[in-house]
Amino acid sequence: MFFIIGLTSGRKDLKFNQVVICSRCGKYGRYMVYMTYTALSLFFIPCFKWNKQYFVQTSCCGTVYRLDPEVGRRIARGEELEIRQEDLEPVSRGWQGGQMKRCPNCGYTTDEDFTFCPNCGGRF
């Protein structure tokens, strides 16, 4: 008898909608909240998740912030709340100007002039 087990990293987009004026680029945008985690899988079924972290990405310029874990858990439970600037810690700056391409298959974004997505191979 043998078991197939593995460790994987995952990302889950959370249902959240808040329109904001971005403090980075000054444009209207919305916060897109997601959770990253590590999971132990048994026979390709995730059984146990840990190392959960919550992030916010702006739709206007792509700036990524680490979200306060308590606020992230409340959003994951489906509570209606407003994310405040104090709940966010900058992680990456995002893009300024320039034309961004988003893959219609996997959602990968890039400012390079690719014809095919470097992440999944699909056509832009």
Image (tube, helix red, strand yellow):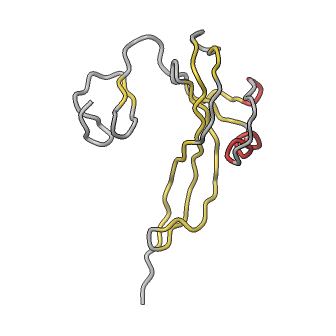
State which quarter of the image contains the N terminus.
bottom left
Location of residue 35 with respect to 1 vertically, above or below:
above
Q: Position of residue 41 (x, y in %)?
A: 50, 68
Q: Position of residue 17 (x, y in %)?
A: 62, 30
Farthest bottom residue in view: 1
Location of residue 118 with respect to 50 vertically, above or below:
above
State which quarter of the image contains the C terminus.
top left
Q: How many marks?
A: 0
Q: Position of residue 11 (x, y in %)?
A: 52, 47
Q: Residue at x 52, y 18 (%)?
A: 60
Q: Residue at x 48, y 59 (%)?
A: 8
Q: Quadrant of residue 30?
A: top right
Q: Quadrant of residue 31?
A: top right
**Camera-nearest residue between 22 and 5:** 22
Q: Quadrant of residue 44?
A: bottom left
Q: Position of residue 71 (x, y in %)?
A: 75, 39
**Camera-nearest residue between 16 and 22:** 16
**Would you say 65 lies left or right of 44 here?**
right
Q: Residue at x 50, y 63 (%)?
A: 7
**Camera-nearest residue between 58 and 118:** 58
Q: Residue at x 57, y 47 (%)?
A: 36
**Camera-nearest residue between 97 and 107:** 107
**Would you say 40 lies left or right of 86 here?**
left
Location of residue 22 with respect to 43 vertically, above or below:
above
**Would you say 119 lies left or right of 97 here?**
left
